[in-house]
Amino acid sequence: MTKFLVTTDFSAHSRRGIRFAFQFALQTQAEITLFHVLDLFDPDLAFDSATATPQLRWTKAIQLKTDQLKKFLHAVFPKGIPDVPYNVVCNKLERTLAQTIINYTKTHNFSMVFCSENGASLFKKVLGSLPETLLNNCPVPLCIVPKQYTTSPLNSLCYTTDMQHIDDEMHWIENWRNLLNIPLKVLYFDYEINLQEHQKTLHQVATTYENKDVQFHYIKLIPQSTFKTLLQETLKVVDPSLVIVFRKQNRSIVNRMLFPGKTISLIMENNLPLLVVRKESE
């Protein structure tokens, strides 16, 4: 069975990520592991160090937080937890929060990781946030749910492409689209769309993949309008339940500071859940 790792820190923001993950799992018949990383510096876990060994402290702390996590999940779904197989896991902190999540993902063969947007400026800072760290290092696709997201069934997908590795990327997306059984719209932005040679190539790509559930939309970039404006206007018209972006990982710090992921930050501004997939190496 497909397995999703859903991270939570018990915050209100993480509730939205949990609801979206359960909806996604419900529509794809996946299994969820609700995951919390435990730090013994948590004031809720102030056990008497004189009467408890370090290992006993961890054991008690994990049990306490596991019980709290079960109660938290019921609070997230006061009308009843969706009919999705799930379990809850509390894990000891390993070096950093992101590294703990990455290690657990690798050792337990998850297909996807879900996390919530945290704070007011998730992508305004290049370093420091959990989602940004996971973006650059997560070994599987990462789904980020915006803090203003309102839960609803997934009814359409949107894929923004640069036309590189289009065959591999469409194959990957089609597998998930078929599981979800919802339509897909593919967006491609370029200044040279009207060039005859370019039009021929784009037509061939669209002919290969288009059907009643898959549509390609080619949007010409123009100097009078910014990419931000065109993307946001297009997303409002398309109104997808989830946007998929393929992205290079492990970029240098300098590269991240100069080019911090324009498309990703703009999509998050539209309050749309975002699925970021590792792009194939050149």
Image (spheres, rainbow, N blue to C red):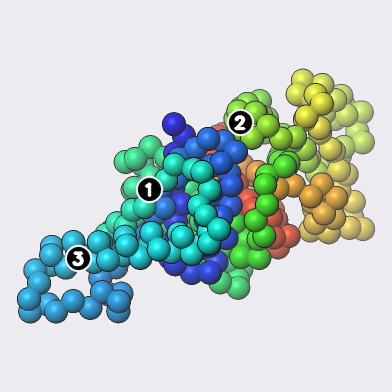
Q: Nearer the viewer, residue 21 or 103?
A: 21
Q: Position of residue 168 (x, y in %)?
A: 61, 27
Using a 10 Å C-alpha cutoff, classify the residue at mark 3 as few (fewer than 14 neighbours), some (14 to 19) or many (20 or more). Answer: some
Q: Is residue 275 left or right of residue 85?
A: right
Q: Nearer the viewer, residue 18 or 166?
A: 18
Amino acid type at mark 1: Asn
Amino acid type at mark 3: Lys
Mark 3–mark 2 distance (CA, rounded to whole Å):
40 Å
CB atoms at circles 3 and 2 under 8 Å apart? no
Picture residue at 75% right of the left edge, 24% below the top: 209
Q: Position of residue 190 (x, y in %)?
A: 82, 43
Q: In what element is the residue under mark 1?
A: strand
Picture residue at 68% right of the left edge, 32% below the top: 181
Q: Nearer the viewer, residue 82 or 137?
A: 82
Q: Which mark is residue 87?
A: 1
Picture residue at 77% right of the left edge, 30% below the top: 214
Using a 10 Å C-alpha cutoff, classify the residue at mark 2 as few (fewer than 14 neighbours), some (14 to 19) or many (20 or more). Answer: few
Q: Nearer the viewer, residue 220 or 264?
A: 264
Looking at the rendering, in which quadrant would you find the N terminus? Answer: top left
Judge whether residue 165 can be spotted in this image. Answer: no
Q: Which mark is residue 221?
A: none
Q: Is residue 253 left or right of residue 268?
A: left
First in sequence, mark 3 or 1: give its number.
3
CB atoms at circles 1 and 2 under 8 Å apart? no
Q: Which residue is mark 2?
A: 179
From what the image shows, is residue 118 above or below residue 101? below
Q: Which mark is residue 60?
A: 3
Q: Is residue 282 left or right of residue 57?
A: right
Using a 10 Å C-alpha cutoff, classify the residue at mark 1 as few (fewer than 14 neighbours), some (14 to 19) or many (20 or more). Answer: few
First in sequence, mark 3 or 2: give its number.
3
